[in-house]
Structure formats: C-alpha cells, structure tokens
Amino acid sequence: AGKFIAAAQADIIDPLARGNAEGARSKLASVNALYLEHRAAVDATVLSGNQFAARTMAEFDTNHARSSTIALVATALAIGLVLLFCRLVLRSIQRPVDDCTRLAQQIARGDLETRPRAGPQRNDVIGALQQALADMQDKLVTIVGSVRQNADGVARASAEIAQGNNDLSMRTEQQASA
C-alpha cells in the first residue's frame, strides 16, 4: 500500500500540482499497475481472512456440537447417579420400616414367637423403632407367660376346690345315709 501511495503522490499528484498534466498522464499506467498489484494483495488478504473465518466458524460449530453432546451425556449421567443414590437411600429406609411393620402385624396377630430379622444395628430413629418393637415383644412374652402361669394356678386351685367340694359332698352324703 505504501509503494502505491508514494508512487501516486510522486508521479501523479505532485506533477499535477506543478501544472505538468502530460507528465502525470504518462505515469498513470505505471501507477495503475501498482494499484492493481496492491488491489490483488488486498483481495488475497480478504480471501485468506474469509477462509480463516470460515474454518474458525466450522471448528466452532464442531466444538459447540461436541460440547453440547458432552454436556447432555454428563447431565444424563448425573441424573442417573442421583436416581441411583435416591433409590439406595429409600431402600435403606424402606426395608427396615417394612420389617418393623411386619413385626407389629405379627404381634397384633398374637405371634410372639417369631423374632425380628437380625440386621445391622442402626443408630437412628429407625433403629430405635426396631429396638422398641423387639423390647415390646419381649415384654409381651413375659406378660403372657405370667398370665398363663397365673391362669394355670387359678385352674389348679379351681380344680382343688372342686375336688374338695366333691369330697365334702360325698362325706355329707355318707353321713346322711349312715
């Protein structure tokens, strides 16, 4: 660009300013050749810039598509991991609660012999509930055993009283008939 501008200044503008139109006209072809050379270089630069821009945009589009795919896969994996974690947490809560429900139902049906499944001891509210149900079952076994023992005692005493009444009745009959 500098070569073309310097030639235009020296060969055309300066001679015209001095009034030498014929000298300026004679240099017009050589300055035009410099202009066309300069213009070809500008066109080549623009073409190179456009090609670079097109390549860069294509690379950007490729990288954007790749990034979107990676983000989508990472999001799907994260959602899968969260769902798996939720399932594990729910299972760790639900299974012991189901065991407690089954034990309470067995006790309600009068089954005091079936013991709860032995599992890992928990140090939380669910563990406290499991322990409370096991303690209640043990206490009910003790109470029912005591009631049975007392009932057996009452039954024996009733049988003895009945036997005593029979003996008394027999003796009274024997004395009345004698």
Image (cartoon, helix red, strand yellow):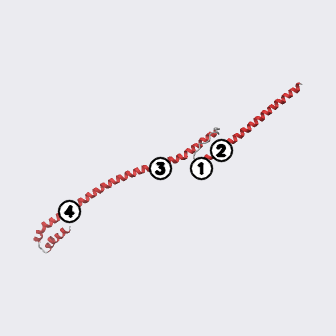
Closer to the camera, 56 or 124?
124
In this rendering, which labeled residue sits more in front, label 4 or label 1?
Answer: 1
Q: Residues within 10 Å of mark 4 (few under 14, many from 20)?
A: few
Gap between marks 1 and 2 measured at Cα: 16 Å
Any mark on residue 136, and which? 2
Q: Which badge, 1 or 2, is on the more N-terminal residue?
A: 1
Closer to the camera, 121 or 103?
121
Instruction: Name which residue type carries label 3.
Output: Val
Q: Callout 1: helix, strand or loop?
A: helix
Q: Which badge, 1 or 3, is on the more N-terminal residue?
A: 3
Residue placed under numbered mark 1 in the picture: 125
Instruction: Name which residue type carries label 4.
Output: Ala
Residue placed under numbered mark 4 in the picture: 41
Which part of the image, by quadrant, shows the C terminus?
A: top right
The x, y position of residue 137, in whole percent, is 65, 43
Residue placed under numbered mark 3 in the picture: 82
The x, y position of residue 141, in whole percent, is 67, 41
Instruction: Name which residue type carries label 2.
Output: Met
Seen at 86% across and 28% down, the residue is 172
Q: Return the residue found at the far bottom.
A: 18
Gap between marks 4 and 3 measured at Cα: 60 Å
In this rendering, which labeled residue sits more in front, label 2 or label 4?
Answer: 2
Q: Callout 4: helix, strand or loop?
A: helix
Give the number of marks.
Answer: 4
Q: Which badge, 2 or 4, is on the more N-terminal residue?
A: 4
Q: Is residue 20 left or right of residue 77?
A: left
Q: Are marks 1 and 2 in contact (CB under 8 Å)?
A: no
Gap between marks 3 and 2 measured at Cα: 38 Å
Q: Is residue 68 left or right of residue 173?
A: left
Q: Which badge, 4 or 1, is on the more N-terminal residue?
A: 4
Q: Is residue 74 left or right of residue 121?
A: left
